[in-house]
Amino acid sequence: MSSSRVFTRREVLKSAALGALALPLLDARALAADPVAATAGSVNEDREHGLRLGVAGYTFRDLGAAESIAALKALRIKNACVFKNQLNWETATPDEARAVAAKYHAAGIALSGTGVVNLTNDEAKSRRAFDNVRAAQVATMICKPDRDALPLVEKLAKEYDQRLAIHNHGPEDKLYPSPSDTFNAVKSLDARLGVCIDIGHSMRAKADPVATIRQYASRVYDLHLKDSLAVPGAIADIPVEVGAGNIDIRGVLRVLLDIRYRDVVEFEYEKVAANPITGLAESVGYVRGVLAAMS
C-alpha cells in the first residue's frame, strides 16, 4: 500500500471520529444528567479489538468532574484517571475521594488510575494518598515517588495491597526521564510496583516506545497514549492528535496486542487544555479505526 493511501485512510478515520463524536459533546450538561447504572470493580473489562481504552486525567486538567464525565460518556470511554483539579489525591480526605469516585461510578466509568501522585518519605503524607486511592477504588496509583521514598512506598503498597505505576516524564525529568529509569527503580521491589509508560516522553528521552513496551512488558501497569511532532532528545514537547505526529502509533498498538496487555491504554491529549474534546475525539476515532483494521 502506498504512503498516500495510508494518509488518506488516516484522514478518513479522523473525519469519521469528528463527525460521529464531536456533535454529542456540545451539550455537556445534558449528557452529564443522563443516568447510567454504576459499574462494579475498579477497571471496566470491556475491550475494543483486544484493548481497554481510557483517558488520562491530565487531558481534562481545565475541566471539572461533570464536564469530564460528559466527555467520557460521549466518547464511549469507560475507564478514566482523575486529575488533581477534580480530586487532589495528596491532600483530600477519604470521604471526598469516595464522593468524587461515586460520580464516575454512577456514570458507568471506572477509575483505572490517578493523575501523577507525588510521594515523599513523609509517611503521614504518603499514607493520606494511599487512603484516598483506596477509598476511591482506583485500580492503579500513577505516581512519582522520591528515590529515598521507595522503601516506604513499597511498604505501603504491600499494606494497602495497592498497585502503583511510576510515570516517566522525559529528558527534563531529574528522577525518571525514561521507562528504563522507572523499571530499574522497581525491578527489585514488590510486584505491586510497576511502570506507567508515557510514549511521548519516552520518545523524547530517546527510548523507542515499541521496543520499550516489549522490554518491560511484565511491569507495565499503565500506558499514556499520545502523539507529538517533537524529535528524540527534545526538551520541549509539541503535542498533536494521535496519528498526526512522529510516534509509531500502529507499532505501539501492535506490540500491546502482541504482549497481551491486560491494563488500560489511557489517551493523554495535551495540545489544547481549555477545550480538549475535539482533539481527543479525533485521537480516539483514529485509534479505534486502526484497531479495527488490525483485527
Image (tube, grey):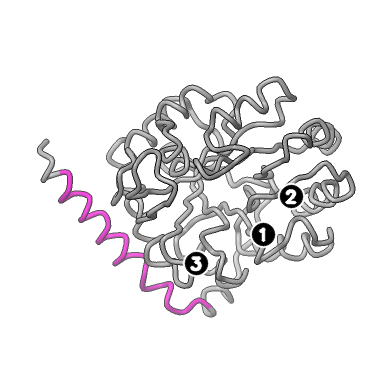
Rendered image quadrant of residue 295 = top left
CA separation in Å, label 1 and label 2: 10 Å
The answer for how far apart the CA atoms under marks 1 and 3 are is 15 Å
Query: Hey, what amino acid is under mark 1?
Result: His
Q: Choose between 69 and 183: the one closer to the eye.
A: 183
Q: Which residue lies at the image location 19% right of the left edge and 49% below the top edge? A: 9
Q: Amino acid at mark 2?
A: Gln
Task: Determine the residue positioned at 79% across, 54% down.
Answer: 132
In the rendered view, tell whether residue 79 sits above or below residue 19: above
- Magenta stretch: give its range: 6-28
Number of callouts: 3
Percent from the top left, x then y, of residue 266?
51, 48
In primary-sequence order, the first of circles 1 and 2 is 1
Q: In the image, is 105 to the left or to the right of 4?
A: right
Callout 1 touching callout 2 (CB < 8 Å): yes
- Which residue position is annotated with label 3? 71
Q: Which residue is depicted at the point 52% across and 45% down?
A: 172
User: Disc 2 marks which residue?
Assistant: 137
- First along the sequence among labels 3 and 2: 3
**In the rendered image, which quarter contains the N terminus?**
top left
